[in-house]
Each structure stands twice: as C-alpha cells, then as structure tokens.
Amino acid sequence: MSLFDKFEPTAKLLQSLLEASPRDPFSVKMDEMKGPTRAIVEGQEIVLAGTNNYLGLTYDEGAVEAAVEAVKESGTGTTGSRFANGTYSAHRQLEEDLAKFLGYKYCMVFSTGYQANLGAISALATAPHDVILIDADCHACIYDGCQLSGAETIRFRHNDPESLDKRLSRLGPEVKGKLVCLEGMYSMFGDVAPVKEFVEVAHKHGAYVLLDEAHSFGVFGENGQGVCEAEGVRDQVDFYTGTFSKSLASIGGFVASNHPQLEYLRFSSRPYMFTASPSPSNIAAASAALKRISSDNSMRENLWKNAKRIHEAFTQLGFETCAPVGPVIAVKLANKEQAFMAWNVLMEHGVYVNLAIPPGTPNATSILRLSVSAAHTDDDLDIVVSAYTALSQILSKQAQEA
C-alpha cells in the first residue's frame, strides 16, 4: 500500500483528457507579461481573461512605485509572523486604512486571503459547543477553516436563506456559538448571494455572520465595499473577510469587524501567529491600490461596462452562462472532454480563460470561467468575442454531426 495510491484515479482521468489535448490547461506558463491583460505564452501573445485582476491594478504606476520603494526601505521580507517580529508600521497602517474604507472599527491583516478565512473561522468557532453553518458552495479555505476549528459543521443549500433558517431552527440550547459563513460573489459561477436575507435569518437565531467578499471587494457597491454594501447591510455583517490578490493586486488577506473581540484573534489564530507576515512590497502595493480604489470610481464603471458587453455577446452566441451580468462570466459545457477541447480552441485564438471541471466545480459542472477586467481594452474584448464566436461555430457543427 502506497501513500500515492489515492491519486491514481485522478492521474488516470487527467492523462486520458490530456491525450486528446494540445495543451495542458493546468500548467500554462506565462513566458512574458506584457501588461495587465496580455502575456506571451509559447511565443503567442494571449489576451488574459482569467486572472481575477478585476480592476486591472497590477501595473498601476502608484502601486508599482510603492512596492519598489518598500523593498528599498524595508527589505524583501519580514522573516517573522505578525505575532513576532513581522508587524511593521505599514501593516498596522493598512489595517487602519482597510477598516476606515469598509466602515469597520477593527481589522487584521493576514499573509493570504486563504489564511484570513482559515485563521478567522478556526479561532472564532471551536469544539465542542460551537456550530458553523456554511453555504454548500463556499470556497475550500472556508471548508478548511471549519475543519481546523473542530466545531460541528452544517451545510445549507447554496444561496438559500430558507435552508439556513431550517438548520438554525434545529439547533438545541446546548449550542453556545453559531457562525454562518457565506460569500458575496462566488468565484466559479459568478453568482451573488442574497446577503441581506442571510443576515436577517442568522441574526434572528442569534448567529454571527462571516462574509467573504474576496471576489466582490472593490467591485460591488457604490464605494466598492462589496455585495453587503450593495444590499445595504454592510454594518450588519459581523466579520468581513477579503483578499489582496484580486482587486487589490497584491498578496495578502484580512478580516474586519466592529466587534472589539476581533483583537483576541491576534493571540489565538494559528495561521496569523505561525506564518511569516506579508512582505513590505505586498503591503505597499495593496495600500496604494486601496487609495486608488477609494478615490477613483472609473475603474469599477469600466469593469461593469466590459462585463455587460461580454455577457451580451455570449448570450447572442447561444452560450449558457451560469449567472447574470458580473465580473465572472462562466459558460457551461457538456462534459470534461468538451471543456478541454473548448479551452484549447480559445487558446488557439489567443484567449486564456480558466478551465474548471468536477470535482472542483458546483453540481459537477464543466465550465470555461472568464473574469473581466477594467483594464481590458476594446481590442482585447474584440479578440475575446471573436474567439468565442469561433468556438460557438465548432460546437454547433459538432451538435449537428452528433
């Protein structure tokens, strides 16, 4: 018996799919970056339409200069955790700036968005008397946070407040703490949660709400505070988590709250206490990006303009999309084999998107996941629409021959 036997089914599946695929969708290497929306891949210039660079700030002049200066002034890394020597004044300042931007009193910065959820959930809810209730489609880091916590975890149906209400109603008086975890916009399909309804249900039962706005921060709401702002309940969310690796164009994560007890997590959250803190350059880049987001609504406006154009074009081409207009536009394919073929067709036509197949997708669905950027030019979008037009023609021909 080998430790590696468990990987054999996955390896066989991948091998069978790759045998008929010119490229490996999961091993794409960007040989040269040409900007926020272009890269050279195997000698071909590709439009990047699967990067989560929603506001296109990875090449923002202010963010780049801030990162360079931070390296010169503070070095390349902290060599310590936030709990030890890894908290610089810049880390604290970013926490204050994020809290102010979001309208919360307290904020903690983690090394990644993954660790923000892992660290917050595992510290907030613990065995044996706490219970965590999570949306079935929550991200892996939320599931892992539940597992690390040791608390009983109960799933409710995706985006279904009534399902949450029923599960909360069944909990007995022995349960001390109840934590409800959900996301603002879900990363695979791009569908948006009815956050206001969820908050009302959770608070009715005395439960706290942790909302992950990783993919919706900077994108939704009048000020870019996320889906909770768009639905008018930002101040009712107990714990707001997010990442720097999407709209903030860096690496890191955070949790914000109006509960003063959030500060206790600095002494009880293992992912906060036992991993190296974000580098000075990452903190500086995120800080500069936050300032730009706070003062410039044009990026968000351009993002939504681009999203509407792409969604409308895909609808006209006959593709089945997974959600209404939004920054993530996922197209459903018939099966894994068709999805691999379709991904390669798009690459041949100069467009990179994310290929997602079961078991990593909800409802065992195979999709091509496109993420729109504010930095996408009209020329970029022309190439995207042209590539999907070619794909539509191929799929139509296959359907006729079947």
Image: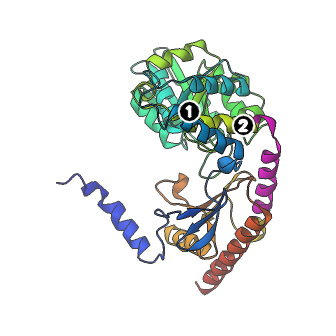
Range drawn in magenta: 294-312
- In the displayed structure image, the side of residue 190 where residue 303 appears, left or right: right
- Residue 227: numbered disc: 2
Q: Quadrant of residue 393?
A: bottom right
Residue 32: which quarter of the image?
bottom right
Residue 318 % position (x, y): 73, 70
Amino acid bearing label 1: Glu
Q: Nearer the viewer, residue 47 or 361?
A: 47
Determine the main secondary structure of the stretch shown in magenta. Answer: helix
Q: Position of residue 329 (x, y in %)?
A: 68, 57
Instruction: First in sequence, mark 2 or 1: give its number.
Output: 1
Q: Is residue 194 something that shows in the picture?
A: no
Kindly give the residue lying farthest to the front in the view shown.
72
Disc number at residue 108? none
Q: Secondary structure at mark 1?
A: helix
Q: Residues within 10 Å of mark 2 (few under 14, many from 20)?
A: many
Residue 227 at what x, y percent from top left? 72, 37
User: How far is disc 2 from disc 1 in space, using C-alphas?
Assistant: 37 Å
Point 67% across, 59% down: residue: 37
Q: The C terminus lies in which quarter of the figure? A: bottom right
Indicate whether 164 appears above or below 207. below
Q: Measuring 44% from the left and 21% from the top, which residue is drawn there?
A: 83
Q: Which residue is mark 1?
A: 73
* 2 or 1: mark nearer the eye: 1
